[in-house]
Image (tube, grey):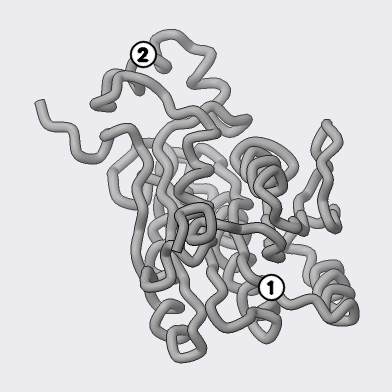
Amino acid sequence: MKLSELFSIKDKIVIITGCGSGIGLELARGFILNGAQVIGISRSRPQEKIDFKFFYECDLNDEKKLKSIIQYIKDEKIRINCLLNVAGISIAQSVTQNEISRFDQTFSTNVRSMFNIIIKLKPLFISGSSIINFSSIGANLGFPDNPSYCASKGAVLSLSRALSNDFGSQNIRVNCITPGYFHTKMTTLSFKNSNEKNKRENRTTLGRWGELKELLGASIYLASDASSYVTGTELVIDGGWSTKGL
């Protein structure tokens, strides 16, 4: 098989959450450019024109609205090849703040809503389909002042591994992409602070932050037939942060 066929996502029906900005928006652009039909679900619309098959403005915690969106997809008799769960939040907090509401809000968005949309969409996945959940290097490393975010992203990893077992018999693959530091709305304060920016650059072996386009190749790989025997795994894209020694 030619590589162009093996890695093809042409005409695949792909749902991307959190595609209003940042990583999700970049992936939506890239998937559409490479021939996929993308259904976008996000709290806010992109500030640029994107050629979505459909776009729905929805907070994934809004159960009523999410149900109506999925019912519309069912009514249109759409079958899904790939789901990219990119939506997520980070609310910085130290343990001394002791604000359990922030912890609950983070878990609701980053874990509960992810599981919820997967379960609701499951009957629409075709055999050979792919679910790609986005975690973070915060799932594996001890970052300060954001316990809820780190814990939630660790839960995403465990959830993905568990679902890969539960869905494997139906030939539905579940994997995780674990990014390091990329310049997005979520990380803009660190990026604009030269001291914080340099500190993060120096933690990588490549000596720089990642560019959003550098997440596209891994995402297309996991969405395509090139990864047809890959499930329950984690693909770390962090410029060498998590493996750097001295």
Secondary structure beneath dot 1 equals strand
Taking depth in this image into account, of 234 and 61 the one nearest to the observer is 234
Left or right of 216: which side holds 159?
left
The mark found on residue 214 in the picture is none
The residue that appears at 44% across and 53% down in the rendered structure is: 177
Callout 1 touching callout 2 (CB < 8 Å): no
Q: Which residue is mark 2?
A: 198
Nearest to N terminus: mark 1 or mark 2: 1
Q: Residues within 10 Å of mark 1 (few under 14, many from 20)?
A: many
Q: Which amino acid does the dot numbered 2 rest on? A: Asn
Q: Which residue is mark 1?
A: 80
Residue 162 quadrant? bottom left
Left or right of 143: which side holds 113?
right
Hey, which residue is sitting farthest top in the picture? 194
The residue that appears at 53% across and 26% down in the rendered structure is: 183
Quarter occupied by the C terminus: top left
Cα–Cα span, label 1 and label 2: 41 Å
Q: Position of residue 243 (x, y in %)?
A: 19, 39
Left or right of 151: which side holds 11?
right
Q: Which amino acid does the dot numbered 1 rest on? A: Ile
- Depicted 242 relative to depicted 74: above or below: above
Secondary structure beneath dot 2 equals helix
Hey, which residue is sitting farthest front in the picture? 2
The residue that appears at 46% across and 57% down in the rendered structure is: 2
Q: Position of residue 225 (x, y in %)?
A: 49, 66
Q: Position of residue 50 (x, y in %)?
A: 82, 41
Q: Residues within 10 Å of mark 2 (few under 14, many from 20)?
A: some
Hey, which residue is sitting farthest bottom in the picture? 169
